[in-house]
Amino acid sequence: MSHPSTAPGLPFRVVAIDALRALTMLLMIFVNDLGTLTGIPAWLEHVPAAADGMGLADIVFPGFLFIVGMSIPFAVRNRQQRGDTAWQIARHTAWRGFALLLMGIFLVNGEYILAADTGLARGWWNVIACTAFILIWNQYPKTWNARLVNSLKAVAALVLLYLAFIYRGGDPGSPVHFNTWWWGILGLIGWAYLVAALLFIWCKGNERVLFIGWLLSIALCAANHARLLPGEGLLHQLLSPIGAGAMTAFTIGGALASQLFWRERNKPAFSYSRLLLIFSAIAIVFLALGFLSRPLGGISKIRATPSWVLICSAISLFSFLLVYYITDVNRQTAWFSLIKPAGTETLLCYLVPYYVYAVISFTHWSLPAWMLTGATGLLKSALFAWLVVAFTGLLTKRFLKLRL
């Protein structure tokens, strides 16, 4: 079977990566909305921290990290195709990572905000912060006046500084200033992306080096749960943002999988059957290692155990194989058009629900109980997730396109 070609000068994309990213983001919005429901199956939700197991919600975030990793080699090649040097790509990578970290910190501070002490309710905090993010990182039309664009970005940056200055959160009895409570979903993505992308750029995509990076990540994760790493101090502070290796295991693993895929795809006689065999074999090994490592903390997303990392990595590989077969081998992509904004405008798609939940909190509006229970509630959350994606698509057609 021959592989599809890309016209000279055009960036190469694998539809399956965008489609899988879209599906993962759709699921992320869906599972995040499950907190508004009652009477739903437990296997859909996060498993408690002390439990040994995982639900659907526990595989979404690692799946997204894995796709972030798979996207890195393609993003780097596309920038190289445009003539960027390694230093320019690394600088761009650092800027993207910083943006994700900044957004993550602001949104996390919103979770701990004391409205009375800050002078802002959480809903307003999120709306103002997200609007500032959009103003700074929006891709403005080239017809817009450069002075106006720079002014909008400057005002947005000043707004974020003001928010950080007035912020008070934590315990009402002893409020604290703007703080790193934890890095948040965007922040964790930012750290994991930074490590994997900079490693990829430094080693020029060398598969052996990427494997060593992945192996080191898994080893750190295992050592952490075997209590071989310090629970405090400088080393703990350095490893904490990457989950002591758990988060980078997903992104570096994704980048390595992408390199293996690239090598196979560019062989003169590319065969999906061979790709299926290679990736399935790796996934089966991951599953076996995942269950064998279960004594090291069990399967737990909240504790980021090695077993959880390996099992979710296997699920990600199987998911990619399935979606690639549908979209790139059989060319069945009509369904993808319904959720495409979640795969191509992912950041904006992630931010939109913050506005929706803020409006609900402002207006104290709520659906009747029967719409928030059981199967009807699940349908509501599924419809909500799709509406968010559809609305994101409408926004990007009009005037908003976030580019980090």
Image (tube, rainbow, N blue to C red):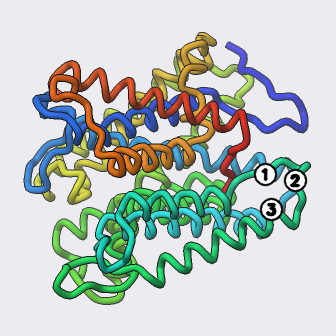
Query: Do residues under tags 3 and 2 come within 8 Å of each other at their CB atoms?
Result: yes
Quarter assignment of residue 27: top left
x and y, in percent, of residue 18 in the image: 59, 33
Left or right side of 167 for 138: right
At 23% from the left edge and 82% from the top edge, which residue is drawn? 230
Query: Do residues under tags 3 and 1 come within 8 Å of each other at their CB atoms?
Result: yes
x and y, in percent, of residue 96 in the image: 63, 62
The disc, 3 or 2, on the residue closer to the chain's N-terminal end is 2
At 74% from the left edge and 24% from the top edge, which residue is drawn? 268
Quadrant (top left/top right/bottom left/bottom right) for the C terminus: bottom right
x and y, in percent, of residue 70 in the image: 55, 44
At 91% from the left edge and 49% from the top edge, which residue is drawn? 143
Query: Do residues under tags 1 and 2 come within 8 Å of each other at their CB atoms?
Result: yes
Query: Which mark is on residue 140?
Result: 1
Query: Which mark is on residue 144?
Result: 2
Toward the viewer: 317 or 145? 145
At 24% from the left edge and 70% from the top edge, which residue is drawn? 224
Q: Residues within 10 Å of mark 3 (few under 14, many from 20)?
A: some
